[in-house]
Image: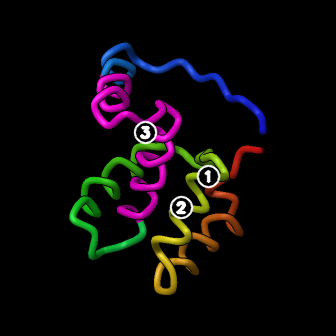
Amino acid sequence: MKTLTVRLPEPLVADIEEESRGRKISKSDVVRERLAGFLVALLSIRDAHHHWAASQAGGLRPPWSTSEAAFSEAYHLLEPRGGPSLSALLRRVALIVAR
């Protein structure tokens, strides 16, 4: 497994660290859940955060990058209805799974 280092705004780092401590899970798990959650919200109109995710996505130029773990979790959560939409993002190279 490879490690990816990214720079995040301090308030976001503090929020991730607080959630990690509060839930007693790793910061990586918090980030994975958030990445997967965004993809699920974006592709599932039934998700409570769909409209927010769609508005955020409109301001982000593709291709978007995500981790294999976040992609796998989103695919699992979206199946069977949302899986094709997630696959379409890959085919259009709008989403890249970091390796």
Residue type, numbered disc 2: Glu
Instruction: Report the residue at 47% width, 43% height from top.
Output: 60
Residues drawn in magenta: 15-42
Residue at mark 2 to residue at mark 1: CA–CA distance: 6 Å
Above or below, 6 relative to 49: above
Above or below, 50 relative to 25: below
Give the quarter of the figure containing the C terminus.
Answer: top right
Give the colouring mode of the picture. Answer: rainbow
Instruction: Report the residue at 40% width, 17% height from top.
Output: 9
Residue 69, numbered circle: 1
Residue type, numbered disc 3: Val
Residue 49 picture quarter: bottom left
Does the stretch in magenta take in 26?
yes
Q: Main secondary structure of the magenta part?
A: helix
Return the residue found at the far front. Answer: 24
Return the residue found at the far top. Answer: 10
Specify few, some or many for label 1: CA neighbours under 10 Å numbering under 14, 14-19, or 20 or more.
Answer: some
Q: Position of residue 35 (x, y in %)?
A: 47, 47
Residue 11, numbered circle: none
Residue type, numbered disc 1: Ala
Q: Are marks 2 and 1 in contact (CB under 8 Å)?
A: yes
Does the stretch in magenta take in 1?
no
| Residue at image mark 2 | 73
Specify few, some or many for label 2: CA neighbours under 10 Å numbering under 14, 14-19, or 20 or more.
Answer: some
Return the residue found at the far bottom. Answer: 80
Q: Is residue 57 left or right of residue 1?
A: left
Residue at mark 2 to residue at mark 3: CA–CA distance: 13 Å
| Residue at image mark 3 | 30
N-terminal-most mark, 2 or 3:
3
